[in-house]
Image: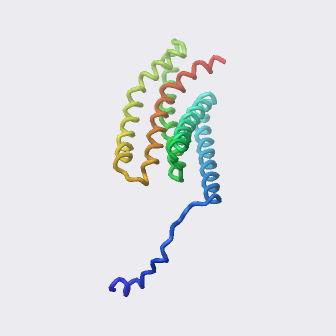
Amino acid sequence: AAISVAIGPLDPAGTSVNTIGPTLGAQLLQGSLISLLVSFAAISLYIAVRYDLLFAFLALLCLAHDVLITCGVFAWLGLVAGIEVDSLFAVSLITVAGYSVTDTVVVFDRIREQKTSLAHLPLQQQVDVAVDATLTRSLYTSLTTLLPLLGLIFFGGSSLFWFSVALAIGIAVGSWSSIGVAPTLLPVLSRR
């Protein structure tokens, strides 16, 4: 009775449920794709200015690799378990792209340093030395990022569960691509 005086009478029929219809879902998809493309373009421009076009191409390739694998896992989960993505999934993809490019830039920076200090070695050996120098740092960074995500997966509640799973998949794949994919393709593509 005291609450009714303060805020008014309770109307049980006044409660509502919000759902996202096809129009809003299409707008969400369009906005997500535009933000991904803008972030890809900004990242490639930054790397092309800071390094060169081959590095920018490889960074974009790794970004696409990481985002596509994360999307592929969720597409598979959608078919098998009926998982639906939401706006947090788009946020996780943009976060994965940023994380991946940061890790790739660290490896590229070390490769650029090795090009000047180990110029007498072939490019493949320079890349190997650079990857060896950054391997421990990249793995430690990925593991320390995955630890809080595991905490969110197990204790974060249902609203953050799939967001955390998407980030964990993206970070694991991003670590692999920045250590294993981009440096491996650099000597192959630079010969052409």
At x 67% / y 18%, what residue is drawn?
192
Give coordinates of residue 74: x percent, y percent.
Answer: 53, 42
Question: Image height check: is 16 above or below 9?
Answer: above
Which of the two residues, 64 or 76, is positioned nearer the viewer here? 76
* Number of numbered callouts drawn: 0
Q: Work out whether 82 lies above or below 15.
A: above
Out of 158 and 181, give the one closest to the viewer: 158
Q: Is residue 88 above or below residue 59?
A: below
Quadrant (top left/top right/bottom left/bottom right) for the N terminus:
bottom left
Q: Position of residue 117 (x, y in %)?
A: 48, 19
- In the image, what residue occupies the spot 40% across and 83% down? 7
Question: Would you say 153 lies left or right of 95 here?
Answer: left
Nearest the eye: 154 or 44: 154
Which residue, as the protein is rendered here, is positioned at the far bottom? 5
Instruction: Between residue 21 and residue 44, name the one nearer to us.
Output: 21
- Horizontal and vertical percent position of residue 143: 37, 35
